[in-house]
Image: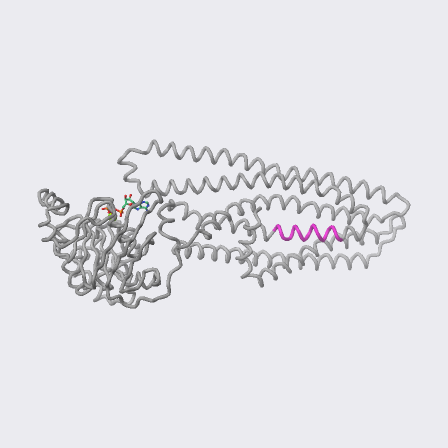
Amino acid sequence: MKKSNLSFLMGYLKKHIALLIISIICSLLASLLTLYIPYVVGQSIDVLKLGQDQVDMQKILFNCLLILISAIIIAISQYFSGVINTKICYNITRDLRRDLNGKIHRLPLKYLDNQPVGQIVNRVISDVEIISDGLIMGFNQLFSSVITIIACLVIMFVMNYKIAAVVVIFTPLSIFVARFISKSTFNLFKKQSTIKASQTGFINEMITNEKIVQSFQMEKENNGVMKKYNDELENIGIKAVFFSSIANPSTRFINAIIYAGVALTGALLCLGPDPITIGVLSSFLFYVNHYTKPFNEITEVIAELQNSFATTSRVKELLEEEEEVKEGDIILEKAEGDMDIEHVNFQYTPEVPLIVDFNLSVKKGTKVAIVGPTGCGKTTLINLLMRFYDPQKGEIKIDEKNLKDITRHSLRDNYGMVLQETWLKETSIKENVKMGKEDATDEEVIEALTECHCMKFVNQLEKGIDTIIKEDGGGLSQGQKQLLCVSRIMLTKPPLLILDEATSSIDTRTEIKIQEAFNQLMEGKTSFIVAHRLSTIKNADIILVMNNGNIIEMGNHEALLEKKGFYYNLYNSQFKLS
Ligand SMILES: Nc1ncnc2c1ncn2[C@@H]1O[C@H](COP(=O)(O)OP(=O)(O)OP(=O)(O)O)[C@@H](O)[C@H]1O
Ligand SMILES: [Mg+2]
């Protein structure tokens, strides 16, 4: 059990300290009263004057009443402590999920780009569940077990230190066995949850790409990988079950030895020169049982807690992951649109330089097109402008302000971005379009949809703009999905616009029409457009021709054609193809 994991969970527990104290008081009350009952029973036995045919009925009845009242209070306190503990655990689950969710939004894209989605989902959902299950068990049982052990020890020493000493001598044996077993299970459970996370990641990846899996006939290969995961899980699972199932019998065995030891010592003491009463011995035997039982429970709970602690490391790891570099505090209200990129170097991986000493100055209102072969760094440049990634060297400025000094939120508020990958939520078309402007009216939504040539297909849908579309726009064509994403931007009318292959799935004629609509919208504003179809960016103010992360040509369409260089060849090859 790592201390740091414990203090991590304690951090979450602190907020519920008031509830925790009430629950502790309830547990304490229940445990102490449970121990009070055998004491009363012992006293009742001593009231029977054996061999003298005398019974103090009044005392016995009074003791019975005490036992009844204690039992009622025990039941009530146990009920309350159970309810409170469950509430605490659910609150912790909620807080953990909230923090994980918030964290994911603050992590650099670099981290998310390199992690299988399934693994992250697993941490937020099932790992948190395992932690809370462990905690519920921990609170409900571990706590009362520990109280019982301590209280029993104190009472036993007060009653008779000699018999108590016998009990204490045997205790380390019980603890040793419990520790040995729990250590072994901890490592196994840790391995188990790591494999489970990888398996979830794998399944997630396969299901999201099932079409590709089937088209490449990778089913057999996937089944093989799946079998490997299952075999590993089986292997570790069996070992883990073995250790956790020997936990109970072994501690029970030791408890039986302790019980026998006490019975023997007690019997000898009853017959000795300074005899103890039969009532005391009988209470003592009760206590020994009460005292050893929690050891059994503790081993069980510890197995569960081990699993939960092993999982805690993984959740903690994600929460402690390095966040995006601290942002500045300038709030960019409404950008004018002057952009300056000065001596920027950037690479995703340390060994592979991509953008080297990149310089570009764009005045407000310029329409910049970025073209170049696949993998030349167009999207990378956009990533830098949006501050999804930070350059390793150099500066990017917007209206003379360094991007690093501007809050990310206000920076991204100024951009309208449409990418090749579309993102639509499982809600109505209207809500999807309104995403960036919650208070837009239906008229505004329809206007934006009309400008983006969406109304034709939207009208054909059952409920028009109120039609619910499936997650990720299932049921719509790729081009239709892109058009919806474009209308979202058309509605918000942001000062800066970024289109990265935004219209590549749309037919050329519609694409040109949308660009015209954008031209109106972008009048006097700065825009960056990445497009493979050069016919659509002919009228850009500047065309940047990129290759291997750098600008190799720059100018407007006519100037670049005259140059008869890279762009000229690119344009002609497309022209010939069409
Ligand atoms: N997250 C990443 N981690 C590591 N390398 C990356 C990452 N994203 C892109 N790259 C690499 O950086 C280079 C530039 O990629 P980029 O996405 O900018 O190309 P692009 O010009 O947009 O290409 P396309 O026209 O195909 O969209 C490529 O070689 C790519 O392999
Ligand atoms: Mg790209």
Q: Residue at x 12, y 56 (%)?
A: 539
Q: Is residue 477 magenta?
A: no
Q: Quadrant of residue 181?
A: top right
Q: Of residues 144 and 510, which is closer to you in this image?
A: 510
Q: Quadrant of the C terminus?
A: top left
- Residue 144 in view in this figure: yes
Measuring 31% from the left and 41% from the top, which residue is drawn there?
A: 209
Q: How would you classify the magenta stretch by its main secondary structure?
A: helix
Query: What is the x, y in percent for residue 511?
Result: 15, 53
Is residue 464 in view?
no
Percent position of residue 260, x then y: 76, 39
Q: Which residues are magenta?
A: 141-154
Inspect the magenta stretch and tell me whether residue 147 lies in it: yes
Q: Residue at x 36, y 43 (%)?
A: 204
Percent coordinates x, y for residue 434 in the rendering: 27, 62
User: For this rendering, which residue is in front, 415 or 343?
Assistant: 343
- The correct choice, above or below, for 392 with respect to 405 in the image is above
Q: Quadrant of residue 75?
A: bottom right
